Image (cartoon, rainbow, N blue to C red):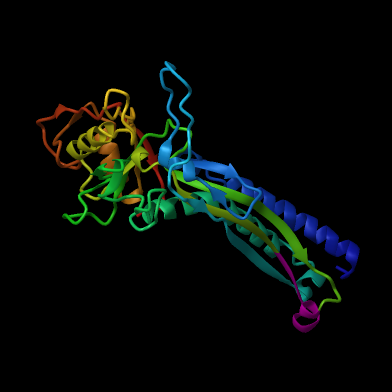
Amino acid sequence: MDINRENLDTVFRGLRNEFRNGLQSGENKSADQIATTIKSTTASERFDWLGDEPQMREWVAARQIHQLASYSYEVYPKSWEVTLKAKRDDLEDDRIGLYSLQARSGGHAAGLLKVREVCRALDNGDTGLCFDGQPMFDTEHPVGEDGDISLVSNLLNSGGASTASPWYIADLSRVIKPIIVVDRKQPEFQAFDDMNNLHTFNNREFLYGADARLGTGYGFWQSIVRNEAALCVDNLMATRFAMSQYTQHKKNPYGQREKLGIRGNTLIVGQANEEKALACLKSATVASRSDALALSANNTPNPCFGLFNLIVLSWLP
């Protein structure tokens, strides 16, 4: 192939199509089940209002104007890139197929960026901070108003005989899901293939690649619990019950904190817990409520049967 502008444009269009095909095949929709994506046009997005979620109240007097709580929480998108190089000699010899595969592979990786970062946010949630200044998964989330604060946990078995593979119970019915994704810029394939640029002159190669801007943060900690104990029926039910007791920050006119109505009905695991999760959820009876993989002829009714949806994410431990 002659190296001229017309032929290089043809190569670029072909590699861009391969990248787009890979991007589509790599896109993993499971991230959208546990994350709320915000399309952004700014350097960061503020979520200060997470500390005081709007609630419908009986209208018996003047409107109660909803104000931002005294929290400051921003999510900043990070920059991401994937780059490949094509040797000029290979293009002259019409060896395009190798680079077509690389471009498709790069697109596939770009398609997995969101789910990979959502899983990273979950896995790092014991240190990553949420809107109240505490780690997303913590034993001391403050609930209440000045002078009337309770400390509430959404991290169970912390410091105990924990497994290497924690699991999560979530309520995914809310507008703001446990993980927030700020999508600033979608992956865009570009070429650096000017025949007269210094890089090409020195290295006899052309550069192709894509960049994106995406960041993750945390939504309401009350919508998800991390459990580091062994996955079994008893622990599933105890975790679900603990979530059901979460209450609002502010008291109602009768001096009570109303329940948030959290229903932990989705189990999120990595591949290490997949077998246990299936054993806990897919049978009407279990051999043991405390050991998901127990073998016994004496089966007991399984309260988890049909109660949870299951999401298995390969990027979780």
* Residue 160 position in % (x across, y down): 16, 54
> Where does the N terminus fall, quadrant-wise?
bottom right
Residue 34, above or below 306: below
Percent coordinates x, y for residue 10 in the rendering: 84, 58
Q: Position of residue 114 (x, y in %)?
A: 53, 50
**Outermost residue to the top:** 60
Residue found farthest to the left? 298
Residue pictured at 19% horizontal, 42% vertical: 293
> What residue lies at 44% left-to-right and 18% top-to-bottom?
61
Q: Is residue 172 magenta?
A: no
Give the residue drawn at x 23%, y 26%: 284
Quadrant the C terminus occupies: bottom left
In the displayed image of the protein, which residue is found farthest to the front? 62
In this orientation, which residue lies closer to the viewer: 75 or 67?
A: 67
Q: Is residue 22 visible?
A: no
Q: Which residues are magenta?
A: 198-208
The answer to whether residue 305 is left or right of residue 224 is left
Question: In the image, 198: left or right of 272?
Answer: right
Q: Residue 186, relative to residue 249: is it above or below?
A: below
The answer to whether residue 102 shows anywhere in this view is yes
The answer to whether 200 is drawn above or below residue 114 in the figure is: below
Residue 301 falls in image quadrant: top left
Total labels drawn: 0
